[in-house]
Amino acid sequence: MKIIPALDLMAGGVVRLRRGELNTVSRYNHMGDPVEVAREWQRQGAQMLHIIDLDAAFGRGDNVEKALEISRELEIPVQFGGGVRDREKASSLLEAGVHRVIMGSLAVNMPEEVYSLVEMYGSDRVAVAVDYRDGFVVFRGWTEGSESPLGDALRNHISGGVRVFLVTSTERDGTLEGPDIETLRMLTKYKETRIFAAGGVGSIRDIINLRDSGVEASVVGRALYEGCFSLTEALKVA
């Protein structure tokens, strides 16, 4: 299993939210500029970096240039999400050097656009964010709910050619209370999928449980930034 450090960007800095709520922001300016933070994760052994543009996700501007700068500076691949809500933006990011784009709202509202990107760039470079609350998909910065159950959404996207899924329990994200292992185990039964799990990791035991669940990767944010364990420790057990 891969361990992928998360780098959430807001107003040009590195932050974390609790359950995606703007009034819970924790800032990590003491760690330096996002490019410095990204270089440090690479130095510690990260095989990939996960960047989310929170300003774009909430419709308050964007941090695209900073994300592209990070992508150019690193030797490891970057996957990028947050506010990627049309095919043109996704294509421009992929052409500019981002390894993988992550889309949630577009996958809900215009899934055919996502499937055309998969056909154009390949299934490794396009991921669908399946963010969920109470078993149903949520989107647009987790501010809107859908009537799509998690399993149904996954099956529909698989039929469209999608293989990489970022699965986030919005109720656990940023809480350090542990991931939703039961749901993740259910989703890994779909053999066509590559599940990247996010939300809730707070201990090395959580990393072990994720590894044993069958997910391909664990995206880890607050637990690393707040010293619950080191990236080196996580990589050893993963």
Image (spheres, rainbow, N blue to C red):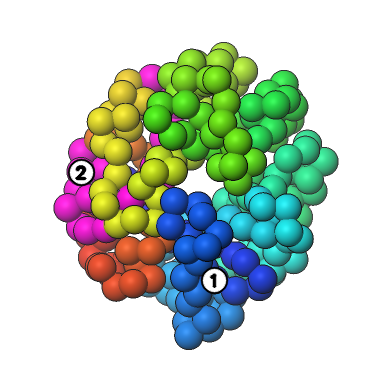
- The quarter of the picture where residue 89 lies is top right
Secondary structure under the numbered disc 1 in the rendered image:
strand
Is tag 2's residue or tag 1's residue first in the polypeptide sequence? Answer: 1
- The quarter of the picture where residue 189 lies is top left
- The image shows residue 33 at horizontal and vertical percentages of 58, 80
Magenta region: 190-212
For disc 1, the marked residue is 14
**Image-based side of 154 in relation to 184, left or right:** right
Viewer can see residue 152: yes
Residue 114 belongs to the span the image colors magenta: no
Q: Residue at x 64, y 41 (%)?
A: 140
- The image shows residue 220 at horizontal and vertical percentages of 38, 56
**Image-based side of 169 in relation to 214, left or right:** right
Q: Residue at x 48, y 85 (%)?
A: 30
- The image shows residue 128 at horizontal and vertical percentages of 57, 34
**Image-based side of 116 in relation to 156, left or right:** right
Depth check: give the residue in front, 29 or 92. Answer: 29
**Image-based side of 2 in relation to 152, left or right:** left
- Labels 2 & 1 near each other (Cβ < 8 A): no
Outermost front residue: 23
Residue 202 belongs to the span the image colors magenta: yes
Amino acid type assigned to the residue bearing label 2 in the image: Asn
Q: Residue at x 64, y 29 (%)?
A: 107
Q: Residue at x 50, y 52 (%)?
A: 20
Q: CA distance from mark 2 to mark 1?
A: 27 Å
31 in relation to 127, above or below? below
For disc 2, the marked residue is 209
204 in relation to 149, above or below? below
159 in relation to 55, above or below? above
Outermost left residue: 205
Amino acid type assigned to the residue bearing label 1 in the image: Val
Secondary structure under the numbered disc 2 in the rendered image:
helix
